[in-house]
């Protein structure tokens, strides 16, 4: 009788359900927010305030990275490096728990591209606006048009770069171990090339969202856009599975649809750290080991259980993790090369 009952459940495809229902459920850590690089510590604080009050992950990831966009001491937002023609151009994207997403690229003179990306998501039938059109939309939405003057740090770095005008954008390779604080001299010497903050969060209601904002590569070709505003590359969220974001050499993240790939690896059951590692391996496989040594890419991810992880190509990438008032700390990304 017992055997017959089991077989009939199996024929209905229910045996897996019967067995898995005996497993104890995984502990869920929520809310939680993680973000790229050490600037993530301050950004996480703003995000945590919202999450800790039961607010939505979407608000948390927007307001979190706005802190970094406002900072003059960072390579994100209007205080950041200009392109090789001397103009700061910004890219950003945002995605919620229902596959709603918005992004802007090649946006000039707007302080908070992440908020414009959110308006694109919420107020237009589109996903992405670029350049002049994105700026027109932002102004129509009430965002002030800021001066195009460079910050003092960026001006100095640009003037220094102009001496050779060498077109060799290098991104996110942190050569000074252990000291991640910004100084213009580091920018000039090439030791500092952080360009992006990516943030993903799981709120108290169990919903995921993510954001990503950048000035892109310093002294880049005019019109160059990286991975950050491209949904699936710089950012991806699937509320059934997890959320991921990227930093580093955008072209190589785009080539493998990096953040989407990380989420798909998590869907297959991989822990976020293992999923990030496999995406990094994919880049190295596509590019070859020698060429991969010249670049940096880092991924971070969280899953629906609030587990998190990060991985990068080479030593030097870190990310900030926050899941309590007194738990907001930096973790070094594990690396492959
Ligand atoms: N990851 C930022 C960029 O490549 O623009």
Image: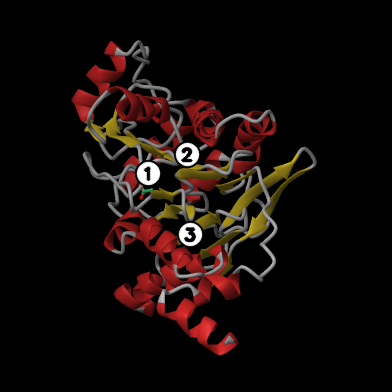
Q: Position of residue 140 (x, y in %)?
A: 27, 12
Secondary structure, mark 2, is loop
Q: Nearer the viewer, residue 87 or 272?
A: 272
Query: Which residue is identified by label 1?
Result: 218
Instruction: Please name the residue shown 22% across and 29% down the image.
Output: 125
Q: Position of residue 158 (x, y in %)?
A: 38, 37
Q: Is residue 182 visible?
A: no
Query: Which residue is identified by label 3?
Result: 298
Taking the image as shown, residue 53 lies to the left or right of residue 133, namely: right
Query: Which residue is identified by label 2?
Result: 75
Q: CA distance from mark 1 to mark 2?
A: 8 Å
Please identify the quadrant where the N terminus is shown.
bottom right
Of labels 3 and 2, the one closer to you: 3
Secondary structure, mark 3, is strand
Quadrant of the image occupied by residue 127 = top left
Quadrant of the image occupied by residue 335 = bottom right
Q: Is residue 186 visible?
A: yes
Pointer 2 residue Cβ closer than 8 Å to ligand 1:
no
* Tag 1 near tag 3, CB within 8 Å: no
Q: Mark 3 or mark 2: which comes first in sequence? A: 2
Q: Mark 1 or mark 2: which comes first in sequence? A: 2
Instruction: Please name the residue shown 37% across and 20% down the image.
Output: 149
Q: Mark 1 or mark 3: which comes first in sequence? A: 1
Q: Residue furthest right?
A: 326
Packing grade of label 2 (10 A; few <14, some 14-19, many >=20) is many
Q: CA distance from mark 3 to mark 2?
A: 16 Å
Taking the image as shown, residue 276 lies to the left or right of residue 233, namely: right
């Amino acid at each position: 009788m017992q055997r017959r009952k089991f077989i009939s459940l199996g024929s209905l495809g229910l045996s897996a359900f019967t067995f898995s229902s005996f497993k104890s459920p995984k502990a869920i850590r929520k809310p939680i927010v993680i973000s790229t690089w050490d600037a993530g510590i301050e950004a996480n604080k703003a995000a945590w305030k919202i999450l800790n009050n039961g607010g939505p992950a979407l608000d948390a990831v927007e307001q979190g990275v706005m802190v970094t966009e406002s900072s003059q001491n960072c390579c994100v937002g209007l205080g950041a490096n200009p392109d090789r023609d001397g103009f700061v151009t910004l890219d950003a994207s945002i995605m919620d728990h229902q596959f709603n997403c918005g992004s802007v690229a090649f946006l000039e003179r707007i302080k908070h591209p992440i908020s414009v990306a959110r308006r694109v998501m919420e107020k237009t039938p589109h996903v992405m606006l670029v350049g002049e059109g994105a700026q027109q939309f932002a102004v129509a939405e009430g965002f002030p048009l800021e001066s195009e003057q460079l910050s003092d740090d960026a001006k100095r770095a640009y003037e220094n770069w102009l001496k050779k005008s060498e077109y060799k954008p290098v991104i996110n390779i942190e050569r000074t171990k252990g000291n991640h604080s910004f100084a213009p001299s580091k920018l000039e010497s090439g030791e500092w090339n952080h360009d992006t903050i990516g943030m993903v969060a799981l709120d108290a209601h169990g919903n995921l969202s993510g954001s990503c904002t950048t000035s892109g590569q310093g002294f880049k070709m005019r019109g160059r856009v990286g991975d950050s505003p491209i949904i699936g590359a710089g950012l991806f969220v699937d509320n059934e599975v997890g959320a991921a974001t990227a930093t580093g050499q955008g072209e190589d993240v785009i080539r493998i649809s990096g953040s989407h790939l990380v989420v798909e690896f998590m869907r297959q059951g991989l822990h976020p750290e293992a999923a990030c590692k496999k995406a990094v391996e994919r880049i190295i496989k596509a590019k070859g080991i020698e060429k991969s040594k010249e670049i940096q890419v880092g991924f971070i991810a969280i899953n629906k259980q609030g587990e998190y992880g990060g991985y990068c190509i080479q030593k030097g990438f870190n990310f900030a993790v926050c899941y309590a008032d007194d738990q907001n700390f930096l973790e070094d990304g594990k690396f492959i090369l």
